[in-house]
């Protein structure tokens, strides 16, 4: 089937998963957590991913036992199955596997575990406490969307279970985060720069960074890691460290992003989902950048136009081998570059309406004469007031770069 990932919103997927995880009750056994998750996930994602049903199997001493069945079943699934059965063996080998050709020798139906037809499997946990979730698929499913979604589900669910075990390590996560975030931006001749990050909880998943690369070149980064707490802090650490090491070695930025993706994709400790924008700004205003699924930064020029920096690729983590492209932009004298995370644009008022990009654009245009620090303070202050000064619903980060003219 022809993939159309442009119609599939990875951030929307993660928000839905986040709401599913929020409904899980802490302190329950792994089996109870997964039973509840499979049922809720099938109900929430069935239309987006064309799901027909779901089976949950849990590891016993010598076999796997059916724990939960959701949705209609043409034939009842077996109560137990050997771990050497082909569908299970393939799932263990790949952690996420799509049985896309029902007439092939790898058909799950021939193994007697699932009815004939397409299906997908993902593995959670480690021996001897592994669980396998099988999703039966109906017409309309798209292989690339399923691969992306199920890898994200597996990583996020693993992160949630890991987070349950390290709930008491908030202090450690906070120390990791604070060690990475600069208190203020470094000096760069001809420019003013300002930065701030506000965590929705004790530890957030947002980050920013500045990488001085000489008198005439400055690296700029901003990102938003999925989740909160220690998993998000570890993910941020990996991304920031990887960017710094890659840039110091004079590697091409697209290669650095591909390498970062491989590291995050294989990680078991983090939630493996992060949007990142990285650019290298020259003193003459030229900007080379890659946007990996992040909210597009905005360039405001003196003539009132706005340029969105979108070129790049998908978020880092879920896909094994994504492709990234370089983008090119220019900051003329007197222009502003404003970078932020979703916590700013998705700040809600008392009626539930988002602050949104349009309000941000109006605010920046009205504040063109302000310094970079003054503009940053206005953005944070206005969005906080928009939400009636309630606690932030999500981590909120802003970086402002003003070219003097």
Image (tube, rainbow, N blue to C red):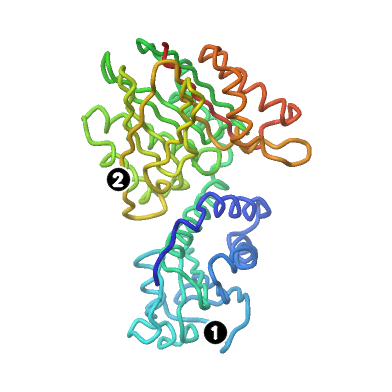
378 sits left or right of 85 in the view: right
User: Is residue 305 found left or right of 17 in the rendered image?
Assistant: left
Callout 2: 10 Å neighbours few (<14), some, many (20+)?
some
Residue 111, picture quadrant: bottom left
Sequence-first disc among 2 and 1 = 1
At 38% from the left and 42% from the top, the residue drawn is 311
* SS for dot 2: helix
Image quarter (top left, top right, bottom left or bottom right) of the N terminus: bottom left
Secondary structure under the numbered disc 1 in the rendered image: loop
Determine whether 234 is above or below 121 in the image: above
Q: Residue 77 carries which label?
A: 1
- Judged from this view, the residue extending furthest toward the left is 250
Where residue 61 appears, x then y in whole percent?
47, 73
Which residue is found at the position 64% from the left and 67% from the top? 43
Q: In which quarter of the image is the C terminus?
A: top left
**Residue drawn at 31 percent across, 54 percent down:** 321
**Do the residues under discs 2 and 1 have CB atoms within 8 angstroms?**
no
Q: Nearer the viewer, residue 271 or 255?
A: 255
Q: Mark 2 points at which residue?
A: 258
Badge 1: residue crowd in 10 Å (few <14, some 14–19, many ≥20): some
Along the viewing direction, whichever of 226 and 185 lies nearer the viewer? 185
- Which residue lies most toward the right here? 350
Residue 244's x, y, as percent?
Answer: 31, 29
Quarter location, residue 73:
bottom right
Please say if 240 is above or below 1: above
The spot of residue 59 in percent (x, y) is 49, 70
Question: Relative to 355, is 141 above or below?
Answer: below
């Amino acid at each position: 089937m022809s993939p159309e990932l442009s119609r599939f919103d990875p951030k929307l997927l993660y928000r839905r998963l986040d709401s599913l995880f929020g409904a899980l009750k802490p302190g329950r056994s792994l089996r109870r957590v997964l039973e509840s998750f499979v049922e809720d996930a099938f109900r929430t994602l069935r239309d987006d991913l064309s799901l027909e049903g779901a089976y949950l199997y849990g590891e016993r001493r010598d076999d796997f036992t059916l724990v939960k069945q959701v949705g209609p079943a043409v034939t009842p699934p077996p109560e137990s199955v050997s771990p050497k059965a082909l569908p299970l063996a393939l799932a263990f080998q790949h952690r996420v596997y799509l049985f896309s050709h029902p007439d092939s020798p790898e058909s799950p139906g021939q193994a007697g575990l699932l009815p004939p037809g397409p299906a997908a499997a993902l593995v959670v946990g480690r021996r001897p406490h592994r669980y396998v979730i099988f999703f039966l698929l109906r017409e309309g499913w798209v292989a690339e969307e399923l691969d992306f979604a199920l890898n994200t589900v597996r990583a996020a669910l693993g992160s949630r279970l890991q987070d349950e075990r390290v709930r008491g390590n908030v202090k450690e996560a906070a120390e990791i985060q604070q060690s990475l975030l600069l208190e203020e931006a470094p000096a760069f001749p001809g420019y003013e720069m300002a930065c701030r990050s506000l965590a929705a909880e004790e530890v957030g998943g947002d980050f920013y960074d500045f990488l001085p690369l000489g008198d005439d070149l400055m690296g700029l980064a901003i990102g938003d890691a999925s989740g909160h707490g220690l998993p998000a802090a570890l993910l941020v650490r990996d991304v920031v460290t990887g960017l710094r090491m890659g840039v110091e070695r004079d590697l091409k930025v697209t290669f650095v992003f591909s390498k970062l993706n491989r590291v995050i994709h294989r990680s078991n400790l983090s939630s493996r989902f992060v949007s990142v924008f990285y650019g290298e700004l020259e003193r003459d205003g030229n900007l080379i950048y890659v946007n990996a699924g992040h909210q597009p930064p905005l360039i405001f020029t003196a003539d009132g136009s706005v340029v969105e920096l979108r070129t790049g690729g998908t978020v880092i983590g879920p896909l094994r081998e994504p492709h990234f492209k370089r983008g090119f932009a220019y900051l003329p004298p007197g222009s502003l570059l404003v970078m932020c995370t979703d916590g700013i644009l998705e700040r809600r008022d008392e009626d539930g309406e988002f602050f949104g990009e349009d309000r941000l654009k109006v605010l920046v245009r009205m504040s063109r004469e302000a310094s970079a620090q003054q503009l940053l303070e206005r953005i944070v202050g206005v969005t906080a007031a928009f939400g009636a000064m309630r606690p932030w619903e999500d981590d909120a980060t802003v970086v402002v770069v003003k070219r003097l003219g």
